[in-house]
Amino acid sequence: MRDMRYADALHAALLDEMRRDDSVVVFGEDVGVYGGVFKVTRGLQAEFGDSRVRDTPIAEQAIAGMAIGAAMVGLKPVAEIMYVDFLPLTLDQLINQASIMHYVWAGQVTLPFVLRTQGGAGTGGGAQHSKSLEAIVAHVPGLKVVMPATPADAKGLLTAAIRDPNPVIFIEHKALYNTRGPVPDGEHVVPIGPAAIARPGTDATIVANSRMVLESLEAAGELAAEGISAEVIDARTPRPLDTATILASVQKTNRAVVVNEGWRTGGLGAEISALIAEEAFDFLDAPVARLGGLDRPIPYSEPLEAEVLPDAARIAAAVRKLL
């Protein structure tokens, strides 16, 4: 195990997979000469050349289309669009092509590509560079959606995504790039699908993903000092969602708080809350609590930005209310 930054763990996964498999190629906005706006792809072009690491114009729909075409002819593209805010520009390619290609071609075509992007707020990026749009792509059958919260999962899940025969939307959180944690040396693969129990508990379940896992763990630590035992579930792959782990936890604790950074209306929190209400209603001792971003643009001002996002204090307060 090595102590690594989240960004460095992603870089390690890309480097290892490109060395292991010549069919892995990287392209996107500023991934080559500049090494990525968050330096995740630094040094890759120097080692593998511009035939395998290529800068593209700022043209998100074209990048997604290139990834689909390259995957169809046997490559394993890892394409990057710089911010999830511009994911809507790729949706025709992702929804009308990538998600259905295997189905409409009766299994004759597979699309092993990864679309990396950066989402989330907390860095003062303003309304055009701070959104959480994972619910849009998680809605679409045929796409997988991955959102790692820890450096170890960043490495392991990206490795799994590159090796997966399906399209994977891999959403990294900008505010996590400099967080640190233990990461296994060498090959490390985390299967896409299973959630992680980030902290065991008995009194309430907190379901979160991405940066909200860290906020939930902070809330659980605060609650533990008050004698309240909160279990934190890291739903690290919104699609496929590990319903079994979530429901088993709620059946044990009898209370649930669902936390997502994205807007509360129509978000992943609504889907998970509905799942719990439908499948674990008889086990609930209180209504499911749902926390999400307020329904408004993300402010540029950092104090105002903090006001529209869930945080550890709000999560802890929601658990106390359930109890």
Image (cartoon, rainbow, N blue to C red):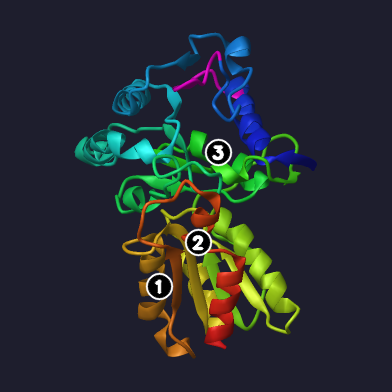
In-image side of 21 versus 280 (left or right): right
Question: Residue 254, image x and y in percent?
Answer: 53, 85
Mark 2 surroundings: few (<14), some (14-19) or many (≥20) residues within 10 A: few
- First reached walking from the N terminus: tag 1 or tag 3: 3
Q: Give the CA distance from mark 2 to mark 3.
A: 32 Å
Q: Nearer the viewer, mark 2 or mark 3?
A: 2
Q: Give the CA distance from mark 1 to mark 3.
A: 27 Å
Q: Quadrant of the C terminus?
A: bottom right
Q: Amino acid at mark 1?
A: Ser
Please name the residue that numbered disc 3 is placed on.
Answer: 158
Question: Residue 303, image x and y in percent?
Answer: 55, 55
The magenta segment is 20-33
Residue 107 shows in the view: no
At x 42%, y 76%, the residue is 276
Secondary structure under badge 1?
helix
Numbered circles on residues, count: 3
In-image side of 281 versus 202 (left or right): left
Please name the residue that numbered disc 1 is placed on.
Answer: 273
The answer to whether residue 144 is above or below residue 162 is below
At x 56%, y 22%, the residue is 21
Q: Nearer the viewer, residue 127 or 271?
A: 127
Mark 1 surroundings: few (<14), some (14-19) or many (≥20) residues within 10 A: some
In-image side of 323 versus 1 (left or right): left
Secondary structure under badge 2?
helix
Question: Residue 87, image x and y in percent?
Answer: 35, 38
Please name the residue that numbered disc 2 is placed on.
Answer: 307
Question: Residue 132, image x and y in percent?
Answer: 42, 50
